[in-house]
Image: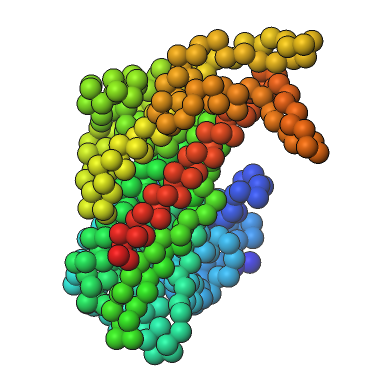
C-alpha cells in the first residue's frame, strides 16, 4: 500500500467508466485514521478510504511542464491535466517536442507585442517559454539556413483559433523580414473579405471558417517577403442553400442586407434576412457581438484597398442578391404530355434573377425546369419534376457562389502580387 502524506498529489479514477472520462488530479488535505480528505482539480473535496489502490502523481505533473515530453506520467490524463494547469495560469502554449499545442483563451492576452517578436527572433525552440512566435521563427531560420521551403501546419477543431494563429505567424514573419507595414496591411485588408465570404456561424463557433486555406509567403534571397498568395480548398458549398438549426449562411449575405442603403436595397429588390429562404432556415439571423452593417463598411473599404473597382463590387452584390432571390423561387407540380413536370408561376422572381445575372429570362426558366440532351444528331428535351427542379436550383446557386468565391480570391492575389 502506498504511504500518503499531507500535501501529496495523486490520480483519482472516475466513478463511472467512459471513454470520455479519465482520471483527474487531487491534493491530500487531511489524513484521519482509515480515510483522507482531498481537493481535486475542480475544487471539489472528497473523503476517500485509505485502503484502496491509488496512483501517486509524478512531480512533473504537479505544476505542469512546458514540454510534455518531459512528463513522468505518460498517459492521457497527465497530458490533459498539464494543459489544464497551464491554461489556468493563462499559459495557453505547450510544446510536445517541436509541436506546439495552443488552447484558445477566448480573450486578448498581452503576449503578441513587437517586444515579444524581438524576444523570440533567432531563438531556438525551448530557449524561451512556448509561443507561436517560436514556431514561426524556427520555420524562418530553417528556410534561410537550408534554402528550402518550410511548412507550418495549423490544425484543430472549430473555434480552436486556427485563423488567429495564422495571422500571428504572418505578423511575426512580416516583422522579422523587414516588410512589417506593407505585408501585414495587405493581409489585414484581405482577412475581412475572406471571412465574410468563407466564414459562418455554426453551433460551436460564431465565426467558423468553412473552407481550408494555404497561405504561401514567398521570400527573397535576403529573407524579405516578396509576395503573398492565398489558395483555398473544400469550400462548404452546401451551406449556401441549407443550414442546420441555430446556424447561419455565410456572413456576407447578412452584412449585405444590414449594411446597404435603402436605395441600394431597392435596386437589388432586397428586404430583410427573414424574408429569404436561404437565410432563415437556421433561425439565427443575428450573432451576438457582430455588427453586420459595420462589417459591410469594412468589407467595402478592404475591397477598394485591394483594387476592386466600384463596378466590380456592385456586380458582386448583384450576384449575391440573385442567389437570395433564387432561394425564393416557388414551383408548382404539373404535367406535360402525361409526364411529371414543374412550373414556375412567379415569373417576377425569375425576372429579377435574370436581370441581376444579365441573362435571358426564358433561358433561365428553361435551365431550371428542363433538361436537354444530345442523342446522336437530335436534341431531346425532358421536363423535371418538382423535386428535381429544387435540386437543379440548388446546384445552380452553389456553382455560382463557388465561382464567385474563386474570383474574389483570385482578385485578392492579383492585388497582392501586382
Identify which residue, 195 or 35, lies in the foreground. 195
Compared to residue 87, the image places residue 141 above or below, namely: below
- Residue 268 lies in quadrant: top left
The total number of labels drawn is: 0
378 shown above or below 186: above
**Between 367 and 89, which is closer to the camera in this rendering?**
367
Quadrant of the image containing the N terminus: bottom right
| Image position, residue 57 (x, y; %) | 52, 67
At a point 42% along the width and 87% down the height, the residue shown is 147
Q: Is residue 176 visible?
A: yes
62 above or below 336?
A: below
Residue 227 vertical placement versus 310 (above, below)? below
- Image quarter for residue 174? bottom left
Is 343 situated left or right of 57 in this image?
right
User: In terms of depth relative to the viewer, which is nearer, 36 or 44?
Assistant: 44
Residue 150 shown left or right of residue 386 in the figure: left
Coloring scheme used: rainbow
Q: Is residue 35 visible?
A: no
Q: Nearer the viewer, residue 337 or 59?
A: 337
Which residue sits at x=69%, y=9%? 334
Counting from the top left corner in percent of width and height, residue 261 is at 22, 26
- Quadrant containing the C terminus is bottom left
Q: Residue 55: x and y, percent?
A: 59, 64
Q: Quadrant of residue 144?
A: bottom left
Measuring 70% from the left and 15% from the top, which residue is drawn there?
Answer: 341
Q: Residue furthest bottom?
A: 145
Q: Position of residue 230 (x, y in %)?
A: 41, 60
For this orientation, the residue located farthest to the front is 377
In the image, what residue occupies the spot 32% across and 66% down?
417
Amino acid at each position: 500500500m502506498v504511504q500518503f502524506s499531507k500535501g501529496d498529489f495523486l490520480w483519482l479514477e472516475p466513478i463511472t467508466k467512459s471513454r470520455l472520462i479519465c482520471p483527474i488530479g487531487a491534493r491530500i488535505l487531511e489524513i484521519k485514521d482509515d480515510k483522507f480528505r482531498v481537493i481535486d482539480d475542480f475544487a471539489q473535496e472528497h473523503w476517500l478510504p485509505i485502503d484502496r489502490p491509488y496512483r501517486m502523481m509524478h512531480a512533473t505533473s504537479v505544476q505542469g511542464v512546458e514540454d510534455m515530453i518531459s512528463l513522468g506520467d505518460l498517459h492521457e490524463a497527465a497530458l490533459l491535466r498539464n494543459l489544464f494547469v497551464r491554461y489556468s495560469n493563462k499559459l495557453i502554449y505547450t510544446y510536445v517536442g517541436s509541436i506546439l499545442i495552443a488552447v484558445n483563451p477566448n480573450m486578448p492576452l498581452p503576449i503578441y507585442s513587437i517586444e515579444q517578436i524581438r524576444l523570440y527572433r533567432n531563438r531556438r525552440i525551448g530557449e524561451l517559454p512556448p509561443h507561436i512566435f517560436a514556431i514561426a521563427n524556427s520555420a524562418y531560420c530553417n528556410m534561410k539556413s537550408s534554402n528550402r521551403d518550410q511548412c507550418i501546419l495549423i490544425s484543430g477543431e472549430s473555434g480552436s483559433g486556427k485563423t488567429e494563429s495564422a495571422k500571428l505567424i504572418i505578423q511575426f514573419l512580416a516583422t522579422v523580414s523587414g516588410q512589417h507595414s506593407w505585408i501585414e496591411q495587405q493581409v489585414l485588408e484581405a482577412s475581412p473579405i475572406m471571412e465574410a465570404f468563407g466564414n459562418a456561424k455554426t453551433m460551436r463557433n460564431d465565426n467558423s471558417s468553412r473552407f481550408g486555406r494555404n497561405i504561401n509567403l514567398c521570400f527573397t534571397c535576403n529573407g524579405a517577403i516578396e509576395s503573398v498568395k492565398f489558395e483555398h480548398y473544400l469550400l462548404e458549398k452546401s451551406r449556401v442553400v441549407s443550414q442546420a438549426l441555430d446556424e447561419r449562411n455565410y456572413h456576407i449575405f447578412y452584412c449585405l442586407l444590414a449594411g446597404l442603403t435603402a436605395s441600394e436595397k431597392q435596386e437589388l429588390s432586397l428586404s430583410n434576412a427573414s424574408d429569404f429562404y436561404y437565410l432563415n432556415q437556421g433561425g439565427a439571423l443575428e450573432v451576438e457581438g457582430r455588427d453586420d452593417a459595420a462589417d459591410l463598411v469594412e468589407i467595402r473599404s478592404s475591397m477598394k484597398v485591394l483594387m476592386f473597382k466600384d463596378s466590380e463590387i456592385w456586380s458582386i452584390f448583384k450576384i449575391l442578391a440573385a442567389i437570395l432571390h433564387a432561394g425564393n423561387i416557388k414551383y408548382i407540380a404539373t404535367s406535360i404530355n402525361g409526364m411529371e413536370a414543374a412550373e414556375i408561376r412567379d415569373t417576377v422572381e425569375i425576372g429579377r434573377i435574370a436581370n441581376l445575372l444579365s441573362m435571358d429570362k426564358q433561358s433561365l426558366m428553361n435551365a431550371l425546369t428542363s433538361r436537354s440532351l444530345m442523342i446522336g444528331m437530335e436534341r431531346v428535351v425532358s421536363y423535371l419534376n418538382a423535386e428535381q427542379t429544387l435540386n437543379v436550383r440548388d446546384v445552380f446557386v452553389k456553382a455560382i457562389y463557388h465561382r464567385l468565391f474563386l474570383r474574389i480570391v483570385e482578385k485578392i492575389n492579383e492585388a497582392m502580387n501586382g
